[in-house]
Image (cartoon, rainbow, N blue to C red):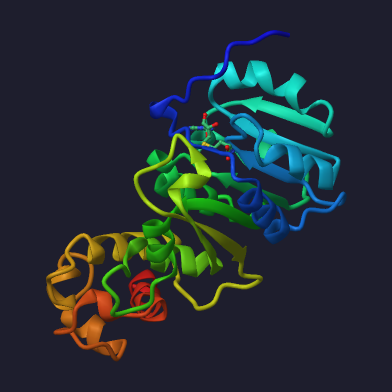
Amino acid sequence: MNQQPHRARKRFGQNFLHDQAIIGRIVTAISPTADDTLVEIGPGLGALTAPLLEAAGKMQAIEIDRDLIARLPEAMAPHGELTLHEQDALKADLNTLFPGEHKLRVVGNLPYNISTPLLFHLCDQIERIADMHFMLQKEVVERMAAGPGSKTYGRLSVMLQYHCQVVPLFVVKPGAFNPPPKVDSAIIRLKPHATAPYEIGDYKAFQQLVTQCFSQRRKTLRNAVNGIAALEDIEACGLDPTSRPETLSGEDFGKLSLLLSKK
Ligand code: SAM
């Protein structure tokens, strides 16, 4: 079929990879095999899809842009068997799309405009995920991997690290994409923990505590948890009420949330 070249859509966060060396490094990092159930979020024009199909033989992909959905089957046919789901990944229910018990290997050069909500959406379905490899803004990767006390440590760090081992792999410069984004990108590997790294009690209470604490970074812990925890709760967990929430480890948040869940 003779098609016009696709014009990248900003609203779908389209920055297409074209650097073959970078694409090769990403595929090597993923190391797909024929036994994997690979799910790519946002296959775009297939820059990653084609080599992944070559390695795995078959895979699934979720794409929102109809124009790309129309192009991909023909373009990918020589490489392997691609099953496409025309859907907003933010609304994708993994159990509905991929029924069964088997765990999924989720990959993607993610649309940067929705990367944080998408990460949280995937964490909500973490029991179906074997691992994840994503391209994200370097700054987001730094936030995901940050530890207590660092400037970039926040809700994303605590929540992601509660669910997964977070491993930043390598930085990718804007020139690897078309059109080039304004900022550096980076590849990250997320491997869900086999068992929770620490107790948190009620998950919703943990989420609320972490969200509230980091929405008020400049406050002391005592003031930041106002309305959800009392001074004696903080002290009962061995935490300093005058400390700043950003100095607390995930486990510290877990202790407080566990205590609040039991009340
Ligand atoms: N994987 C391709 C590559 O590396 O060249 C494209 C990556 S591009 C940064 C992001 C892709 O995600 C685009 O194909 C875009 O249409 C798709 N996308 C954007 N928002 C989406 C959403 N909510 N659900 C599914 N796909 C989405």
Point out the image quarter for the C terminus: bottom left
**Farthest residue toward the top?**
2
Percent x, y of residue 149: 28, 80
Front residue of 218 and 107: 107
Q: Can see residue 174? A: yes
Percent x, y of residue 211: 29, 60
Q: Can see residue 99? A: no
Front residue of 46 and 121: 46
Counting every numbered tag in the picture gives 0
**Farthest residue toward the bottom?**
238
Residue 83: quadrant of the picture: top right
Please give the name of the residue rendered at 65% of the width and 37% of the height, measured from the top-left corner: 47
Percent x, y of residue 99: 75, 39
Please give the name of the residue rendered at 47% of the width and 63% of the height, measured from the top-left corner: 160
Percent x, y of residue 247: 27, 80
Please give the name of the residue rendered at 59% of the width and 31% of the height, measured from the top-left corner: 44
Please give the name of the residue rendered at 82% of the width and 42% of the height, measured from the top-left corner: 54
Residue 193: quadrant of the picture: bottom right
Q: Would you say 156 lies left or right of 119 here? A: left
Q: Would you say 204 lies left or right of 31 here? A: left
Residue 222: quadrant of the picture: bottom left
Point out the image quarter for the N terminus: top right
